[in-house]
Image (cartoon, rainbow, N blue to C red):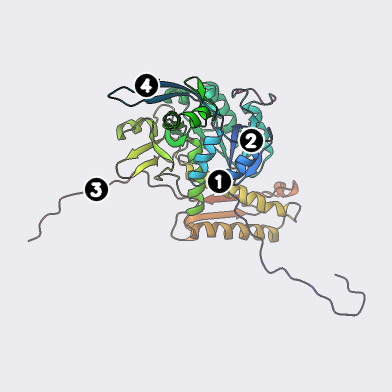
Amino acid sequence: MNYKTPGAYIEEIAKFPPSVAQVETAIPAFIGHTDKGPRNEPTRISSMLEYETIFGKAKNEAFTFNIVAATANTPRTVTATVSPSPFKMYYAMQMYFANGGGPCYIVSVNGYGTNPSLGNETTAGSLLFGLKTLEKEDEPTLIVFPDAEFLAADAYQLYNQALDQAAELKDRFVIMDVVGTVAEFRLGVTKALKYGAAYHPKLETVLTYSYDPAIMVGGQSLEYWKTNDSDLYNLAKNAMESKKVVMAPSSSMAGVYAKVDSTAGVFKAPANVGLNYVVAPTEKISHEDQESLNVDPTAGKSINAIRTFTGKGTLVWGARTLDGNSNEWRYISVRRFFNMVEESVMKATERFVFEANTANTWIRVQTMIENFLNQQWQDGALAGSKPEEAYYVSVGLNKTMSAQDILEGRMNIEIGMAAVRPAEFIVLRFSHKLQES
């Protein structure tokens, strides 16, 4: 500053170095159909109440009833059969929040009057159109499709497009359900495998299907029986509520990701965690069954099993991406940790755009990133007994840049990290210890 007038002047000297702020890691975007609300407009919510206020309730399901009159030896009975609709968003949100979910985005592509469709990026009301609208949102880090099961084989194209988006933006991860058979799913999903994970089987939940109080039972509405035959009313109501919602696991897993990230960290594998609101998986998977799911020697596409264990309940028993044969990107926690660091560092280094590409700037950038990675190491995200074993940051002339790079305005920064990996196989070795004389 050039001082021209006599007097006292204040100058503030910056003593604190620039820092890297860690981005959020578990902000899912649910793409599907809702009762009401804005269409094809990613909307942030943070609670089930907020969802209901903006997007409404579940679709009332269709039930049929069988009423057996009482006899001298048996009481009157009512059984119900449900034909579930393809719209799972409301139940997905219940499972998400029950399993630890927090803030998330809803992309409502259409209402309940039109069945879920694949469409394309220009077909308003389709799931692919909804996925396209998500590209412009920076905060979401997970992608979930609660209604994908209805698409059958078309779900594979939807998942492939979502994986492509994750690979292009490098800041999100796709949680998938196994649609069709495991073999069909593995054959159909082929893109950017390290950016997604799949879970199997479906889950029987404690949730009950929504129904219209005016639903017809034995020729009259349920409301009619409430005032004219309370016994029949209660029998019919209990028959409907005995039918539990069966859900694909992706929404529950989004909640698990959020819970593990907030309690342990994104570097912790989202596995060996109990699922809430779950009675049991619809298919019992044994140790031997899981061998072919976890390790796919042909295509390398790992499927994470959800299993029931005696005395422990229903647990997530897998932590692999679809790229299960890759030594680098085999584990969900490693891929998502790199996503977090890459996004955090990229945002932090944007402040240095148009700064002088000189040694002084390089030192500031290197120190900023090293401080961030040192904190990650202290938190347990990086392996190594000392910082130099856990990470390195390199930037500078004749290190990561040539003179030509500097002339062309490029600052190249190389970062290496030893991310911790889950102990997937714990081997206990026993031997006889010889008796000592």
Circle 1 SS class: loop
User: What residue occupies the far bottom of the structure in this picture?
Assistant: 7
Disc 1 to disc 2, C-alpha distance: 16 Å
Circle 3 SS class: loop
- Label 2 is placed on what type of residue? Val
Along the polypeptide, which appears first: circle 3 or circle 1? 1
Along the polypeptide, which appears first: circle 2 or circle 3? 2
Percent x, y for residue 45? 62, 44
Give above or below for 23 relative to 82. Answer: below
Q: Are marks 4 and 1 in contact (CB under 8 Å)?
A: no
Q: Does any portion of residue 386 appear in the rendered image?
A: yes
Magenta: predominant secondary structure element? loop
Disc 4 to disc 3, C-alpha distance: 64 Å
Percent x, y for residue 47? 58, 46
- For residue 103: magenta? no
Percent x, y for residue 224? 52, 27
Query: Circle 2 sits on which residue?
Result: 107
Residue 133 is left or right of residue 394, and the answer is right
The numbered mark at residue 429 is 3
Structural crowding at the residue carrying mark 1, measured as other residues with C-alpha within 10 Å and reported as few (<14), some (14–19) or many (≥20): many
Structural crowding at the residue carrying mark 2, measured as other residues with C-alpha within 10 Å and reported as few (<14), some (14–19) or many (≥20): many
Q: Which residues are magenta?
A: 117-122
Query: Circle 1 sits on which residue?
Result: 26
Along the polypeptide, which appears first: circle 1 or circle 2? 1
Disc 3 to disc 1, C-alpha distance: 38 Å
Give above or below for 347 relative to 300. Answer: below
- Label 3 is placed on what type of residue? Arg
